Image (cartoon, rainbow, N blue to C red):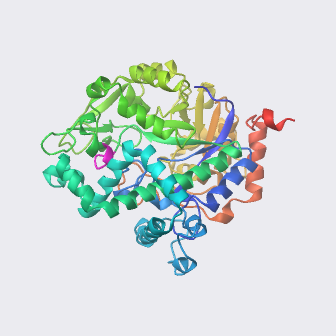
Amino acid sequence: MPFPRSSGILLHPTCLPGRFGVGELGSEAQRFIDFMANSGQQFWQVLPLGPTGYGNSPYASYSAMAGNPLLISLEVLQKQGLLWDEDLWNIPEFPIGWVDFDRVTAFKMPLLQKACDRFKTQASPEQQQKFADFCHSKAYWLDDFALFMALKGEHDGESWHNWEPDLAHRQPEVLDQARERLNREIYYHKYLQFEFFHHWAEVKQYANDRHIEIIGDIPIYVAHDSADVWANPENFSLDEKTGEAKIMAGVPPDYFSETGQLWGNPVYNWEHLQETGFAWWLRRFEAMLDYVDIIRIDHFRGFEAYWAVPQGETTAMNGEWIKAPGEEFFELLRLKLGRLPIMAEDLGVITPEVEALRDRFEFPGMKILQFAFGSDPGNPFLPFNFRHNSVVYTGTHDNDTTIGWHNTASDWEKEQLWLYLGSIGSDGVHWELIRMALTSIANQTLIPLQDLLGLDGSARMNFPGKAEGNWGWRYRSEMLSHELGEKLKTLTRISGRLPQPRDDESD
């Protein structure tokens, strides 16, 4: 659906500052929301919030519906009495400006176990009832997820398709034995989800109370080593004997990679999903809308046709496009939800058919200014080629920062940018692109916080195709200055993107 003229900031919660080595859903999240509200922003876009595995990518989660326990606020648990003051006395010296995920996990998970043990024995009847209600309302994914994580721990992190065949193929009596054997671990993983959703709900309510909506991110594919694939193998293209992906997802060669991107996720068994009325997909969207206001669909083009790479390939070059029933699915989703608060990530190989699917449901597509100056005036990322129903970014989580991009751009590309702008002001190229984005005709503008802060490529969030060393950047608390907020607010005002007065505020 089209959105009103507005703007916001892209920042994953792990990037928030704080004492414990990783961003948390506590006071610093509220401070960031205050910064957005004071500077006239109306959207906070986050990356997928699920628990991550190897490489720490939010796009390779153990569950499409669960939350990342590392985001649980230790300070909130302390206020609840589930952690004591002495539990937080000996905090390691974590890196400044970067998440050392291994050290954070080693420090934080034992504390979360301690909070769980205290909750189990000390929680009031009212708290215990809230926990029971949560487990009941989320049972359709939580039961499988908690068992999956308990079994994964029992198997030292081994992927589910390498477990004993009876567990990998979910023999009922073997699962019953596992539930009894791992009862404590299952409780622990359910508790972590209870706390995550409680903390996230508080943050979201804090944002909504300040007229800021949360844009969540739903990757079209789920990780092969996930509770989703293990619990619902019929939904995916798997080798029936080994459980491995029979057909793998990815994209052909593009701007980011000469050999394409081979993600390794199993593609969907769309025929089976159609036979079930897309039940799993509908529940996934409904679950997502429980804790975000708007959904950005990552790799939207996969709903029209997807790149399918046979098992055994080591690059994404030898694949083929296969049609997907996106129109049928979104028609059904619209019947279920009414309005569709969806944004489409429509980058990459986009055909007229993909554009037609996007436009049929009025999903705004994405425009990236860093892509605008490498060709001719027909470039769709140049602002004069925008449509109103679109979302413009300086760059995304997969791009370098704007300063990093400019530092490594070719002389020809820099010249095209200079000719377009007329000059680059003393505030730097990042503010030139921010101004260009805000003053464009696109209904929405979303700016990565790194660009607002004017950071170079060392603050890049992700480098596609690079397996390690991504996702770790964090900002420092003092970076969100009053002067920065005022400057952003001024640009937001002159570009006509400040929030409009609400009926309840005009009296």
Question: Could you tell me which quadrant the N terminus lies in?
Answer: top right
Q: Of 166 and 68, which appears nearest the observer?
A: 166
Check residue 80 for magenta coloring.
Answer: no
Q: Of 126 and 413, which appears nearest the observer?
A: 126
493, above or below 376, in the image: below
Q: Is residue 14 left or right of residue 453?
A: left
Residue in the picture at 29% in, 33% down: 268
439, above or below 159, in the image: above
Residue in the picture at 39% in, 20% down: 328
Give the x, y percent position of residue 34: 71, 53
65, above or below 19, in the image: above
Q: Of 416 and 197, which appears nearest the observer?
A: 197
336, above or below 434, in the image: above
Give the x, y percent position of residue 421: 67, 38
Q: Is residue 385 left or right of residue 236?
A: right
Residue in the picture at 56% in, 27% down: 377
Give the x, y percent position of residue 260: 32, 40
Residue in the picture at 46% in, 18% down: 356
Check residue 225 for magenta coloring.
Answer: yes
Q: Inspect this view and state whether residue 63 appears.
A: no
**Residue 190: quadrant of the picture:** bottom left
Q: Of 495 and 336, which appears nearest the observer?
A: 336
**Residue 28: quadrant of the picture:** bottom right
> Magenta stretch mostly in which secondary structure?
loop
Q: Which residues are magenta?
A: 223-228
